[in-house]
Structures are given as C-alpha cells and as structure tokens.
Image (cartoon, rainbow, N blue to C red):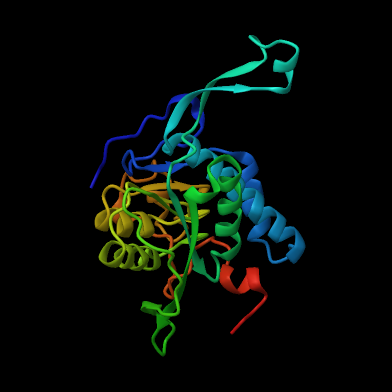
Amino acid sequence: MVHETIQVPGGWELPHRYGPRVHVLDNVYLLSALARIGSPNVAHRDLMALLRSVYQTLLMTACGRELVRLPSEVPTRMSATHPARGVYRGPIFDPKEQVVVVDIIRAGIVPSQVCFELLTAVLSETSVRLDHLTMARRSDAEGHVTGVDLSGSKIGGRVDGATLILPDPMGATGVTTVRALRHYLQDYGRPKKIVALPMIATPEYLRAVLEEFPDLVVYTARLDRGMSDADVLETLPGTYWDREKGLDAKSYIVPGAGGMGEVINNSWC
C-alpha cells in the first residue's frame, strides 16, 4: 500500500505518507531529549526535566496549530506612556475555548500536568480541565498485551464541543488511546477535536488510532519503526505502512525508551 507524500511547508515537521493528520516534528532538541530519556544511564532527575521540556514543546506546537485564535487588543505596560501605540494587536487563543486534558495513569501523569498548567496560563482557568484515567495493560502469561483495564477513573464531566488532548508518552499499540476515546465517546459526548501527543509513536499506533478515529490528529516528537526490514527503513515513512514495524513480540517500542510508566515513577510492579 503506497500513500501520497505529505509535503510539509516551513520545515517544522518531517515528510511522510501517513496522511495529513499525522505530524512528526523535525526538532533536534526533542530528538536529543528523547535520546537521553531512553538512555539507561540518565539520572532520574534529568529524565524528569527532559520529559517536561518535551511536553512543553509538543503542547505549544500542537495548540499553536489546533486551537482557535482570535484577533485581540491587549494594553501593555507601555500603554501608560504611549496609549495608542503601547497596545498589542494580533492573534491570541480564544480564552473561552474548552479544553480537556486526559491523564492516562501512570506514564501520563507528568505530561498531562505539564499540559494542564501551560494551558491554564493562557486560557481561562475555568475552560481547562484535567481528567484522570486509571488504565493498565492486560497481558497474558507470555507477556503479550491482550487489552486495557479501565477502573477507578475520575472524569470531570462531558466533553461536547471541547478539544480533547491526550499526552500519553508512548504510542505503542494504540490500544490505550483507542480504549480511552471509546470510553469518552460512549459516555461523555463528542469533542470538537481530538489531539494525541505521544512523544514516541510507532506505525502500528498510527494505524490503530487513525483507523478507529479518522478525525484524530497526532503530534509526535519521534517515529520509531526499528523492527522493520532494512529495505523498508530506506523508504519514506508510510510508503509501506503495512510492512513497517516498531513493536517487539511483547508490544514494546523499538528502539523506544522502555516501560515509561515504571521509569517515570521509579516503580517496577
């Protein structure tokens, strides 16, 4: 299966053939940070600082392109001495835009908090909500992922007309994202827009989430397809989507960064 190449203006993301709703950022800081995050030698305090910086960048990039902007006139401190000229005139976010950030516990705890705090700084505090989904992989005796357990979640209300943001770090199988969104759409209404922010994504993740939710938008800092054949790796991502692989037999991303839920929380059970 061959898809049309997405030509990216401005050079802020990498070209691919996954379709216009996938954005793989072309940012060397993010790539450098992810290389450190995935290293077995990184200190935990450094890992957490890097994780926060990755999600600050992802959130700013995605929201700068996906949220509603309005023309504004905002007086600055200079307006006291220059009343006519000391005014910012230009676009800002619609301060009344409704946004729901989804914390998928455990790996999503820190990324979702980062996104929530950044958004409340530029939008109305009453317009931004942080939900908590307690989700865990179900695995069989051989360690293969069989599903997702969803219990003990705390959701603050309906999402009709809101932008739903999912800052779950590892876009591996897509099972967690699909299960979370099914839960929202079944019980809490239909959001205006859904934006997924995996810091690392696989071709399998992209296929799973886009097949189920064709209107979903994905922003990721890195695409990992390290289990693909050598000839596939030489082609533009998405050229042979059905042959691309980023997961090992236990559904962990390769090269990836290991089990981020365990790493972030320093908890291995």
* Residue at image coords 48%, 48%: 127
Residue 247 vertical position relative to residue 136 in the rendered view, above or below: above
Of residues 140 and 119, the one nearer the viewer is 119
Of residues 239 and 162, the one nearer the viewer is 162
User: Can residue 81 be seen at all in this image of the molecule?
Assistant: yes
Of residues 39 and 73, the one nearer the viewer is 73
* Residue at image coords 38%, 59%: 205
Q: Position of residue 252 (x, y in %)?
A: 48, 69
- Residue 263 falls in which quadrant of the image? bottom right
Q: Position of residue 93 (x, y in %)?
A: 49, 34
For the C terminus, the image quarter is bottom right
253 relative position to 7: left or right:
right
User: Can residue 25 be seen at all in this image of the molecule?
Assistant: no
* Residue at image coords 58%, 68%: 260
Q: Position of residue 135 (x, y in %)?
A: 44, 74
Residue 27 vertical position relative to residue 167 in the rendered view, above or below: above
Residue placed farthest to the left in the image? 1
Q: Position of residue 20 (x, y in %)?
A: 33, 38
